[in-house]
Image (spheres, rainbow, N blue to C red):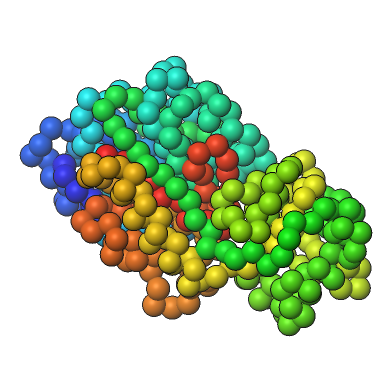
Amino acid sequence: MSGLVYAAGRPWPQLLRSVLDQLDTEVAPAPLGLVFLADPTTEMADVMLDGLRQRTGIQTWLGAASTAVFAGGRELSGEGAIAALPLALEGVDLHPFAGSPPVGAKGAVCGILHVPDAADAGAAVATLAASTPAVLAGAQGASIFDHAQIAGSPSAGAATGVLVSGSVAMAAGISHGCRPLGPTHRVTAGAGNTLTALDGRPATSWLAEEAGELVLRDQRQLRRQLLLAQVPTNAELTNAPLDQAGSVFGIDHADPLRGAIQLSGIGEGGPPGRVQLFRRDPALALHDLQALAAGLLQKLGGRPPKAALFYSSIERGIGFFGPGVDEATVLGRVLGPVPVIGMRSAAEVVGTKLTRYAAALALIA
């Protein structure tokens, strides 16, 4: 069972049959299989898993579902897709979990984590990260179906994944592809998901000053281009990458008459205390993605990766880069023959926190 297999654009029985036919059953079962599904195939996740287990002998399959998956150097979406990769790791112990951190967390080297669309998703990431020294990577799927996380079986409602201990290495990183537009501001008025004043001035005044009046008047471009990052206390992000920020928020609407801006991605804690404005840059995002891949290869110190896990925000893709640009293809130019598998994500995980609008990459060796 060597190599990445995938199929797309057909009814689910044909997709499953195609994937199973591609799998090589002449070698011993791998300890772990990675599988990602693109809607509407997600609806039949349990049948897909049964077929993969029977064909391969691999009992532990890990993955998630979304609107699109990455496989074979391209993005697969539309009428459904499935991508599967038996992960031939030797000398490892697996610690699958759903909800609470698993026994063995303290001895784990790396972990793959998928979180549900829930208000406490960020807290679930932080809880797992605090329980283990393992390098963590993962995401929140964007499927429209329930039970869109896979950790042995389809599941929903809790963080799921697997921690791995033993002779394995994982290098992981994240990139947003954004440029800072101004200094840090204190939020001096606001409630819920709405900010009305920054540093004592109307929030839209700063928006117009730093991003330009034209963006302020064009709500579509405002939503596409701008992000607001939570700045930790005593930190400054003017010349630092956005991945050093706290939470990252989209800007859904600006109301110059009220001086207010409405944010997406605000949790139960209410508006942040300090923020900084960033502009999303497609060219910079592609450059940073290639640099991230090259840097992670260096971190492995010459150890060849067996697989690359790739999660890229649903806010990226054709709506951000334009037609003719495929992030998986861009990654392939740097990673070469390393199989890349993953999905479009609603939020991304690397390390101790959940973020958004990013690309997360993990190389497993």
**Horizontal side, residue 332 vs residue 220: left or right:** left
Would you say residue 364 is visible in this rendering? yes
- Residue drawn at x 22%, y 25% as measured from the top left: 91
Q: Position of residue 73 (x, y in %)?
A: 29, 62
**Horizontal side, residue 308 vs residue 220: left or right:** left
- Residue drawn at x 29%, y 24% as measured from the top left: 166
The residue at the far top in this view is 103
Give the camera-side residue of 91 and 298.
Answer: 298
The residue at the far bottom in this view is 214
138 relative to 11, above or below: above
Q: Position of residue 164 (x, y in %)?
A: 35, 28
- Residue drawn at x 49%, y 56% as measured from the top left: 175
Give the camera-side residue of 47 and 277.
Answer: 277
The residue at the far left in this view is 26
Would you say residue 52 is visible in this rendering? no
Q: Position of residue 153 (x, y in %)?
A: 40, 34
**Horizontal side, residue 219 vs residue 69: left or right:** right
61 relative to 201, above or below: above
- Quadrant containing the N terminus is top left
157 relative to 102, above or below: below
Give the camera-side residue of 112 and 96.
Answer: 112
- Residue drawn at x 81%, y 68% as measured from the top left: 206
Q: Position of residue 167 (x, y in %)?
A: 26, 28
- Quadrant containing the C terminus is top left
128 relative to 238, above or below: above
